[in-house]
Image (tube, rainbow, N blue to C red):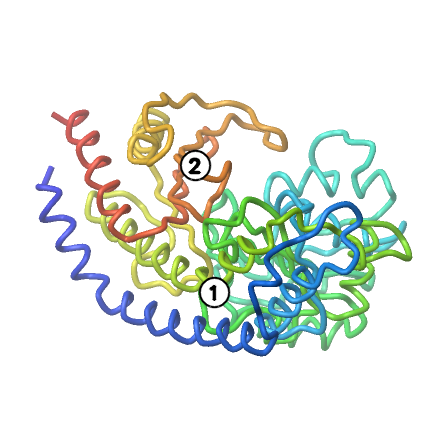
C-alpha cells in the first residue's frame, strides 16, 4: 500500500476546490445564524430555562424564533423532549395524518426506523398502518436526478408527500436543495393541497439554502445531528407553516396546549450555543467526509458520493465488499475517538433495524452523529457510512489509523 502520508497529501490537494466552496457556504450560513440571533435579541437571560410545565419560558420561545428565522418559516418547535429525528418525524406524521389519508414517499423506502413507524416493518400496534393510514412509495430520483415519470402511479391525492433528504443506509445520492426545489414545483402542480414534508436529518447548513426556502411546507430533524453543533445533549426540531407546526405540537404535548408547554430543564444555553456553532462544525464535517471519499477512492474502494459530486448531507458511504473489512474500518474509527477508544466493536441488532449494525462512535453525546462516527448494517455490500466530525484534523488522524489497519491485513 502507498504510504498514507502521501495518500493524505494527494487527497488534500484533490479536494482543495471543494474545501474552498465549503468555507464560502460556511460564511454565508454563519452570517444567517448571526442575523437570526440579533433579530431575536438573544441575551444570557434566555439561558436559565424552566421546569414543570415550562410556562413563560422566554428562552425556549426565543430559540424557536431563531430557528424559524434561519429556516425561513412561520413557526418552529424546538424541544429537548424530542429524543431523535425519528421521533420528530413521527410527531409530524401522527399529528397531521388521519385514517384513510395517504402518505406518499417520493424518495423510495425511508430509513429503517421510519419503516417501523409506517408499518412496513415490524408489528407495532401503533404504526400508521394499524391506524389505517395508507402508504405508497415511488422513487422520483432513480438515477440521482428528478424524474416525474412515476407520478402517474399515484391515483389518490396524498395528504402528505415525504422526501428523505439523506441517503439513509442506501447508496442513492442525498438530495440537494435545487433537486428538492424541482420536485416541489412538480408536486405542487399535481397535488396543490398536499403537505410537502422533508426529513432534513444530516442536511442542515450543508448548502446556503434549506428545503423550506424552496417551498417545502414542513421539515424536521434531530439536534444530535447538524443543528446541535455537537454540544446539544438531545432534542429535535420541526419547522414550517404555522398551522402545521401547531398540530404537530399538539401531538407532542396535548390537544389545545400545543407549543405553550415544554420545560427546557436548563438546556437553553447548550441549544443556543450548539446552533451558533453548527455552520462551522458542519463545514468541518463536510471537509472531513470529502477527504474520506478521496482517500478511499485512491485505495480502490467504491465511494458514494464521488469526490466531485454535489453533496446534500454530511454522510460519506464507502463500500467495503466484505464483513471483515467493514468491521476493521469501523474498529479503527472507534479507536480514534476521544471517548471509549478501548472498546472492541461487535455488531448487534438495535431497535428498528432488521440487520445487525456496527456502530463506531467515541462521542461525548450518546449516538451523536454530528461527532466523528461511522456505522453500517452487516449485510452486502458491507458499507461503512461515515458522518460528522468536529474537526478536519480528527478525520486526518482517523484515516491514518484506518490506513494502518488496512496495511496490516494486506501485509
Given residues 367 and 355, the one toward you in this image is 367
Disc 2 or 1, which lies upstream in sequence?
1
Please tell me how many numbered marks the rendered image carries: 2
Given residues 119 and 126, the one toward you in this image is 126
Q: Residue at x 42, y 21 (%)?
A: 346
Residue 194 location, quadrant:
bottom right
Q: How far apart, in angstroms, are the residues tagged by discs 2 and 1?
A: 22 Å
Q: Residue at x 64, y 43 (%)?
A: 83
Q: Which residue is label 2 attached to?
A: 375
Q: Which residue is label 1 attached to?
A: 205
Q: Residues within 10 Å of mark 2 (few under 14, many from 20)?
A: many
Q: Quadrant of the N terminus?
A: top left
Residue 347 in the image: state x and y as whole percent. 46, 23
- Judged left or right of residue 83, residue 363 is left
Q: Does 132 sit above or below residue 332?
A: below
Q: Residues within 10 Å of mark 1 (few under 14, many from 20)?
A: many
Residue 257 location, quadrant:
bottom right
Check residue 215 in the rendering and tell me which mark sits there, or answer none: none
Residue 373 in the image: state x and y as whole percent. 40, 40
Callout 2 touching callout 1 (CB < 8 Å): no
The local secondary structure at tag 2 comes to strand
- Judged left or right of residue 110, residue 170 is left
Given residues 178 and 37, the one toward you in this image is 37
The local secondary structure at tag 1 comes to loop
Residue 267 in the image: state x and y as whole percent. 60, 50
Of the two numbered discs 2 and 1 in the rendering, the one whose residue sits closer to the viewer: 1
Amino acid at each position: 500500500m502507498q504510504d498514507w502520508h502521501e495518500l493524505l497529501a494527494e487527497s488534500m490537494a484533490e479536494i482543495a476546490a471543494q474545501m474552498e466552496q465549503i468555507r464560502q457556504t460556511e460564511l454565508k450560513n454563519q452570517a444567517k445564524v448571526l442575523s437570526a440571533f440579533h433579530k431575536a435579541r438573544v441575551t444570557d437571560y434566555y439561558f436559565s430555562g424552566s421546569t414543570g410545565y415550562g410556562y413563560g419560558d422566554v428562552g425556549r420561545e426565543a430559540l424557536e424564533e431563531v430557528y424559524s428565522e434561519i429556516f425561513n418559516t412561520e413557526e418552529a418547535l424546538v424541544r429537548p423532549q424530542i429524543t431523535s429525528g425519528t421521533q420528530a418525524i413521527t410527531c409530524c406524521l401522527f399529528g397531521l395524518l388521519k385514517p384513510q389519508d395517504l402518505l406518499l414517499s417520493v424518495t423510495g423506502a425511508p430509513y429503517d426506523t421510519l419503516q417501523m413507524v409506517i408499518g412496513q416493518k415490524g408489528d407495532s400496534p401503533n404504526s400508521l398502518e394499524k391506524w389505517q393510514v395508507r402508504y405508497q412509495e415511488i422513487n422520483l430520483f432513480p438515477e440521482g436526478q428528478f424524474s416525474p415519470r412515476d407520478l402517474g402511479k399515484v391515483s389518490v391525492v396524498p395528504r402528505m408527500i415525504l422526501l428523505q433528504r439523506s441517503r439513509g443506509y442506501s447508496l442513492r445520492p442525498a438530495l440537494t436543495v435545487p433537486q428538492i426545489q424541482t420536485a416541489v414545483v412538480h408536486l405542487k402542480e399535481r397535488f396543490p393541497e398536499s403537505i410537502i414534508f422533508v426529513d432534513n436529518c444530516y442536511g442542515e447548513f450543508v448548502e446556503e439554502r434549506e428545503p423550506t426556502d424552496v417551498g417545502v411546507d414542513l421539515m424536521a430533524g434531530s439536534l444530535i445531528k447538524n443543528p446541535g453543533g455537537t454540544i446539544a445533549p438531545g432534542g429535535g426540531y420541526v419547522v414550517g407553516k404555522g398551522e402545521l407546526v401547531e398540530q404537530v405540537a399538539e401531538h407532542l404535548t396535548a390537544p389545545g396546549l400545543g407549543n405553550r408547554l415544554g420545560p427546557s430543564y436548563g438546556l437553553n444555553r447548550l441549544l443556543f450555543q450548539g446552533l451558533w456553532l453548527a455552520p462551522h462544525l458542519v463545514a468541518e464535517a463536510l471537509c472531513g467526509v470529502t477527504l474520506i471519499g478521496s482517500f478511499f477512492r485512491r485505495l480502490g474502494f467504491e465511494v458514494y458520493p464521488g469526490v466531485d459530486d454535489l453533496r446534500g448531507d454530511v454522510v460519506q458511504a464507502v463500500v467495503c465488499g466484505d464483513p471483515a473489512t467493514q468491521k476493521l474500518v469501523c474498529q479503527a474509527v472507534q479507536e480514534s475517538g476521544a471517548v471509549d477508544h478501548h472498546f472492541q466493536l461487535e455488531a448487534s441488532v438495535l431497535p428498528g433495524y432488521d440487520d445487525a449494525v456496527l456502530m463506531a462512535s467515541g462521542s461525548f453525546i450518546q449516538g451523536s452523529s454530528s461527532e466523528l462516527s461511522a456505522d453500517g448494517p452487516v449485510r452486502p455490500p458491507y458499507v461503512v457510512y461515515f458522518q460528522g466530525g468536529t474537526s478536519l484534523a480528527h478525520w486526518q488522524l482517523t484515516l491514518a489509523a484506518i490506513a494502518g489497519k488496512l496495511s496490516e491485513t494486506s501485509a
